Image (cartoon, grey):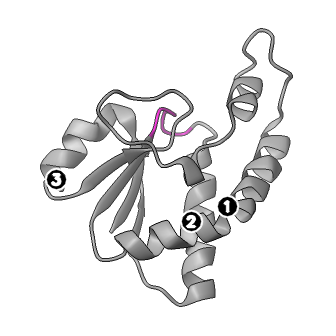
Amino acid sequence: MLLLGQVSKIRSYQKTYPDALVYTMTVKPLPGIENVACFTPKRVMVYGYKQYAGWPAVSEAAYTKAYIDLLNSRKYAIYRWYKAIRTQDVILCCFCRPGNFCHRRLLYQYLCWLEKKFSEHITLVLD
């Protein structure tokens, strides 16, 4: 099982899935939790989308295209990671709130595609 969830719910996920491996996929590191670089968007994408001062603006459409392009450029690293975890419960978290545009949803769609492409079954859960 691969659960794509929120950093704010890590403790809850750990209670529900006590044996699951927990990772982040965030631009800002979270102490004590390993970040999975192949899923992490570039800082310019995140800060531009959030319209942080000093960063060039990034629209939702531009972010989506850039993130999918980034995943495609990392597809071999993603596939190796995917193969390594397919028999374990894994939780991948980011900071985005539910209902907001988020790379977690884009990643979910990408992994569904990857699962079909490589005929590898893994239960995907999007929270």
Q: Main secondary structure of the magenta part?
A: loop
Location of residue 100 with respect to 21 vertically, above or below:
above
The residue to which callout 3 is attached is 16
In the picture, measured across the screen, residue 10 lies left or right of residue 85, that is left
Location of residue 111 with respect to 4 vertically, above or below:
below
In the picture, measured across the screen, residue 85 lies left or right of residue 46, that is left
Q: In this rendered view, identify the residue nearer to me: 35 or 1.
A: 35
Q: Are marks 2 and 1 in contact (CB under 8 Å)?
A: yes
The disc placed on residue 52 is none
Label 3 and label 1: CA atoms lie apart by 31 Å
Residue visible at 81% across and 10% down in the picture: 54
Amino acid type, residue under disc 2 in the picture: Ile
Q: Earlier in the sequence, mark 3 or mark 2?
A: 3
The residue to which callout 1 is attached is 74
Q: Residue most toward the top? A: 53
Which secondary structure, mark 2? Answer: helix
Location of residue 66 with respect to 80 vertically, above or below:
above
Residue visible at 44% across and 42% down in the picture: 35
Residue visible at 66% across and 67% down in the picture: 75
Magenta highlight range: 94-99
Q: In this rendered view, identify the residue nearer to me: 33 or 5.
A: 33
